[in-house]
Amino acid sequence: MEKASSSSIHPSSMETKAAEATGNRFYEIFEPYCKWNTHEAQDILEVHLKGFRKEQLKVQTNNKGILKIHGERPLDATKWSRFQKELKLDKNCNPNDIRAKFSRDILSITIPKKPKEEANRSIHKDGHESTSSEDKKKKRGRVWGVRISKRRMAKVAVVIVAVVVVVAIGTQIARLVRGHRHTLEEAPTKDSSFMG
């Protein structure tokens, strides 16, 4: 959900978008003015609905994490005003604990957040629950997906460093030997300097 603390989602209140005919009724579709109030434990969405009554409104959530807000009311014998909003809920909210209250032309929808510890929990393949900090500890003890104790991991690191050092020393010795051969081949021998 996009949220801005105490700011409006739509700049104009009760703006008419379109009118459509259905049977004997004409519907004027509008986008209500909405305002988010963000708090640590919950978010509150205020939807301004001047002229509506509680029984003309409907607030629902589905199992896909969508919050649906719908309402319609008569303006005269054949003309009705209607709106519909759908919002994607954050994963850290409790959809079953969402509450709505309509008072003084404002629909207040309270969306409680999960406690931080509960939001960080994950379910593993073997069915047990653990927090993300436990997951991080377990990942630290893995090399290429294989679980290794910290002591064993330290030994493996020492062996890897030793191999790198031996290869580096061997390469250096090979360069020195190759360089020494070239020096011997190019150097004049004692016999050849006296000849001639």
Image: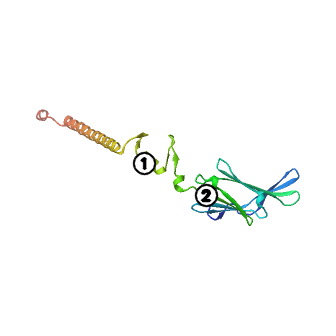
> Eyeballing the image, is 163 above or below 120?
above
Residue located 77% across and 64% down the image? 50
Q: What colour scheme was applied to this rendering of the protein? A: rainbow
Q: Are marks 1 and 2 in contact (CB under 8 Å)?
A: no
Query: Are there few (<14), some (14-19), or many (20+) residues within 10 Å of tag 2?
Result: many
Query: Residue 79, position in %: x, y?
Result: 86, 57
Identity of the amino acid at label 2?
Pro
Mark 1 vs 2, N-terminal side: 2
Instruction: Using the image, determine if residue 31 lies above or below residue 149.
Output: below
Check disc 2 and report its element: helix, strand or loop: strand
- At x 58%, y 60%, the residue is 41
* Quadrant (top left/top right/bottom left/bottom right) for the N terminus: bottom right
Q: Which mark is residue 75?
A: none
Tell me which corner region of the image, top left, top right, bottom left or bottom right, holds residue 104. Answer: bottom right
Question: Which amino acid does the dot numbered 1 rest on?
Answer: Lys
Query: Horizontal placement of 99 versus 129: left or right?
Result: right
Marks 1, 2: nearer the viewer: 2
Which quarter of the rendered picture does the C terminus lie within? top left
Q: Which mark is residue 112?
A: 2
Q: Which residue matches tag 1? A: 137
C-alpha gap between disc 1 and disc 2: 30 Å
Which class describes the residues within 10 Å of circle 1: few (<14), some (14-19), or many (20+)? few
94 and 149: which is toward the camera = 94
Q: Is residue 163 visible?
A: yes
On screen, residue 89 versus residue 106, left or right, reads left
Whether residue 128 sits left or right of residue 74 in the image: it is left
User: x, y (%) of residue 185?
Assistant: 20, 34
In this rendering, the count of numbered labels is 2
Q: Residue 186 in the image: x percent, y percent?
A: 20, 36
Q: As displayed, is residue 138 above or below residue 55?
A: above
In the image, 13 versus 119, the foreground residue is: 119
Q: Determine the image quadrant of residue 30.
A: bottom right
